[in-house]
Image (tube, rainbow, N blue to C red):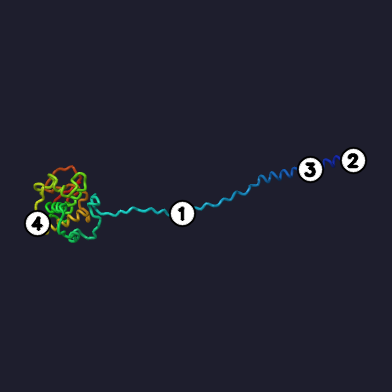
Amino acid sequence: MSRKVQWASAMALAATAFAALIGAQGSGAAASDMVPAPAEQKPAVTFVSKPVVQAVASEDGVETDGVPAEQAGTEISDAVSLAQLVTEQAMPQKLDRQMRCLAGAIYFEARGETLEGQLAVGRVIVNRAASDRFPDSYCGVVLQRSQFSFVRGRAIPAVRKHSQGWRRAVAIAQIARNGSWKSPAKGALFFHAARVSPNWHLTRVGRIDNHIFYR
């Protein structure tokens, strides 16, 4: 009986040891499943900041009151005054018809006024020639019916071509055509003598000498 008990005890002990061995192996596998695997190493992303340079459009130009490039010069004068710019203008040996019309309008409308007043009158002629509302030439503008009181029979009266007034009018006409000096009545298309009040419904630009200018 004693041997049977011992043998049973030995068998129970062996079974217990075998179960313990099997349990330990199982726990080890489960624990290893719970250990976090090292993350996949990816190359770092580097951001490089580079300046973006955009070309800026050139804004070269000159005061032309909207006159197309073919009708207005692009050379900006470095004269310190309008009077100096007038003296720098060469008197051409012969004027073409369009310039005679422009200078003639300046001469008859404003030869007794300041250079600024004469330039403002000249610029009105230039502005009109560039506008769709008027003829497209200086002579067409000046000789248009009922526009300029000095015009007689669709013609400009004769001028004293050797006079200082004419030489000055020609110089102002060249400046007005070229747009080489800022107009004191920018964008004006109309003017009248200050002594009259035509009650025009236009935008007034200002008064220069004896004329009032409008857009």
- In the picture of the structure, the residue carrying the numbered disc 4 is 160
> For the residue marked with disc 1, what is the amino acid?
Ser
Q: Earlier in the sequence, mark 2 or mark 1?
A: 2
Disc on res. 3: 2
Tag in front: 2 or 1: 1
Q: Earlier in the sequence, mark 3 or mark 1?
A: 3
Q: Nearer the viewer, residue 158 or 127?
A: 158
- In the picture of the structure, the residue carrying the numbered disc 1 is 49
Q: Is residue 40 left or right of residue 169?
A: right
> For the residue marked with disc 3, what is the amino acid?
Phe
Q: CA distance from mark 3 to mark 2?
A: 22 Å
Q: Position of residue 94 (x, y in %)?
A: 15, 57
Q: State yes or no: discs 2 and 1 in contact (Cβ < 8 Å).
A: no
Tag in front: 3 or 1: 1
Secondary structure at badge 2 equals: helix
Q: Position of residue 73 (x, y in %)?
A: 23, 55
Q: Earlier in the sequence, mark 4 or mark 1?
A: 1
Q: Nearer the viewer, residue 48 or 21?
A: 48
- In the picture of the structure, the residue carrying the numbered disc 3 is 18
